[in-house]
Amino acid sequence: MARSSISAQPTAKKRGNAHARKTARVAERGPKKRFQTRLLKWYREYGRDLPWRRTANPYRILVSEVMLQQTQVDRVIPKYHEFLEKYPTLSDLAAAEPEEVRKTWYPLGYNIRPYRLHSIACEAVERYGGNIPQKHDDLMSLKGIGRYTAGAVRSFAFNKDAPILDTNVMRVLHRIFVGEGNPKNQKAKLWVLAEETLPKGKGYDFNQALMDFGAMVCTARKPYCLLCPMREFCKAFPVQTK
Ligand code: SF4
């Protein structure tokens, strides 16, 4: 009884601390919530219609994700179709000669990628019966799959709330929630942000939206800050461009 009455009447110092904690939490939660709501709304209106968004086939999604690393969407689209026509399944890809896969990949560049993709296919056939595994640790155990690709495959193929962090997403989260320093040196923090901002049950749309927003609004060189729905709470607003 005595204990409860003490806790029911906190000292001024305790009240101050509680208030400070509450204020800090609200200040963080507010922008995050607004960011989630506005990003999803923006995506419903402006999201791109891309071929890999019309499938839930994990292999096709993996192919698109590997192709999209360091390569523009418009260059990837025709090659994505051509590649899948030639290697329609993971097993077809595993059975192909690596050199042939590299030739099909041309001219996308970054030639380590077709070899990597081929080796993932071989490993998945051997260890998972020709399927792409769903679990984070299983995906990460495949040589050539990093944290970003695992998150992308889990959210886009298996509808999981798995965070992603590529260069675009890093830039968006860093500008909005951090606003200073070099994002490349803050990866751990940005991964936490990617996880924290992901709204429950909306991993697929939210991650797609993040990528579109980074490619279309919060671009690297000339972000559209004045038209941006995040400008009220973005820590980097307005980004000065030369
Ligand atoms: S205000 Fe500018 S920097 Fe901030 S999220 Fe929008 S486009 Fe990016």
Image (cartoon, helix red, strand yellow):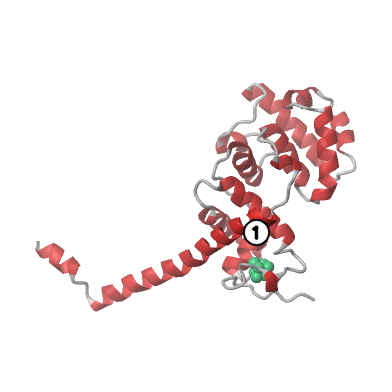
Residue 71: tell me if it is visible. Answer: no
Work out whether 138 lies above or below 44.
Answer: above
**At 70% across and 32% down in the image, what residue appears?**
59
**At 57% across and 47% down in the image, what residue appears?**
203
**At 69% across and 59% down in the image, what residue appears?**
214
Dividing the picture into quarters, in which one does residue 227 lie?
Answer: bottom right
Residue 104: tell me if it is visible. Answer: yes
* Residue 89 horizontal/vertical position (percent): 74, 26
Count how many numbered circles sit on residues in the image.
1
Instruction: Assign the C terminus to one quadrant of the image.
Output: bottom right
Work out whether 101 lies above or below 190.
Answer: above
Q: Going by the image, does 12 lie left or right of 131?
A: left
Work out whether 223 lies above or below 209.
Answer: below
**Within-10-Å neighbours for mark 1: few <14, some 14–19, many 20+:** many
Dividing the picture into quarters, in which one does residue 94 lie?
Answer: top right
* Residue 112 horizontal/vertical position (percent): 81, 40
Q: Going by the image, does 86 lie left or right of 161?
A: right
**At 67% across and 27% down in the image, what residue appears?**
124
Q: Secondary structure at mark 1?
A: helix
Work out whether 68 lies above or below 194.
Answer: above
Which residue is identified by label 1? 170
- 165 or 42, which is in the foreground? 42
- 96 or 159, which is in the foreground? 159
In the orientation shown, which residue stands out farthest toward the front? Answer: 45
**Quadrant of the rendered image holding ligand 1:** bottom right
Q: Which amino acid type is marked by label 1?
A: Met
Instruction: Assign the N terminus to one quadrant of the image.
Output: bottom left
* Residue 210 horizontal/vertical position (percent): 64, 55
* Residue 51 horizontal/vertical position (percent): 75, 41
Q: Is mark 1 within 8 Å of ligand 1?
A: no
